[in-house]
Image (cartoon, grey):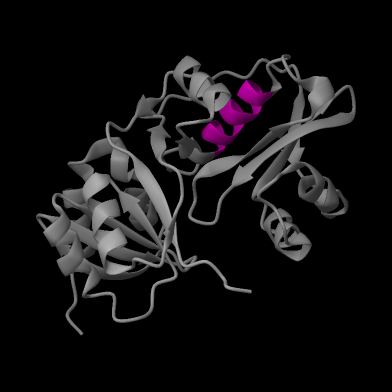
Amino acid sequence: MKEFDNNYALSILRRSGVLTVDMQEAFVRGNVERLCFANEKAVLLKHKCGDFMLWCSDTESGLDALDFADEEIYCCIGHGKFAVEAIKLRYPDFTIDPPCRQYCLASREKIPLSGSVTIRPLRLDEAEIVLEHYAMAHDLEHIREKIRSCQIFGAEKDGVLAGFIGFHEEGSTGMLEVFPEFRRMGIGTELENYIQNYQLDRGWMPYGQVYLTNDASLSMQSKLGLAVSDDIIQWCLLEDED
């Protein structure tokens, strides 16, 4: 099996800026299970969570990179239209999620918190609350494991849990949910600022992905002054037939 140089791959990815910041952070945070392919035109890696990530400058280069996967792919995140096209061609049975933009706190400057809420790690006995309110959560034990590893934080308003935020499997910021009775109080912004500062304290680049149809979240990212990718990202998955 041919080996590729991580530092070389990282230098290639940094040229594409915000679009591949999640791939860059996989190297920075030590979350690359395997660098499958890297040259000037394409990078393919496998994240420790099991997902593959592909960037390429043209469709043919993306197809060439996918030849080096050396195992069956169940999820591949396409970075840019060429990468998505390569994945579609190689895996026509994959389901393609709607397009996202990627955002990151390029300034790396910590954001002062207002102190309007108390933010803390969620407790295990609050896992069912996450399952109830977050539409993309389906596995209670998985939520409990994320709480055990301090990946979900809650905001309390006057001693009452008002919402939460956390990390997705590949490291992006997400899982943001503010309960209906606490909305329009700035709690979502406070949670996002908190988790960004949390990452900066650890030397990480805070980043997240937002569907182009999520107007509320797109507006929040803009107000926070985050840098945005010019091209789109799409998750491409082999759906479980069961």
Does the magenta run of residues contain 79? no
Q: Quadrant of the C terminus?
A: bottom right
Q: Is residue 189 left or right of residue 6?
A: right
Q: Residue at x 29, y 57 (%)?
A: 54
Does the magenta run of residues contain 191? yes
Q: Which residues are magenta?
A: 188-198
Q: Quadrant of residue 164?
A: top right
236 over 228 or under it: above or below: below
* Residue 44 picture location, percent across and down: 26, 63
Name the one closer to the observer, 96 or 160.
Answer: 96
Q: Residue at x 40, y 67 (%)?
A: 93
207 over 157 or under it: above or below: below
Q: Quadrant of the N terminus?
A: bottom left
Q: Residue at x 19, y 76 (%)?
A: 3
Name the one closer to the observer, 120 or 227.
Answer: 227
Q: Residue at x 49, y 15 (%)?
A: 223
* Residue 237 picture location, percent across and down: 45, 62
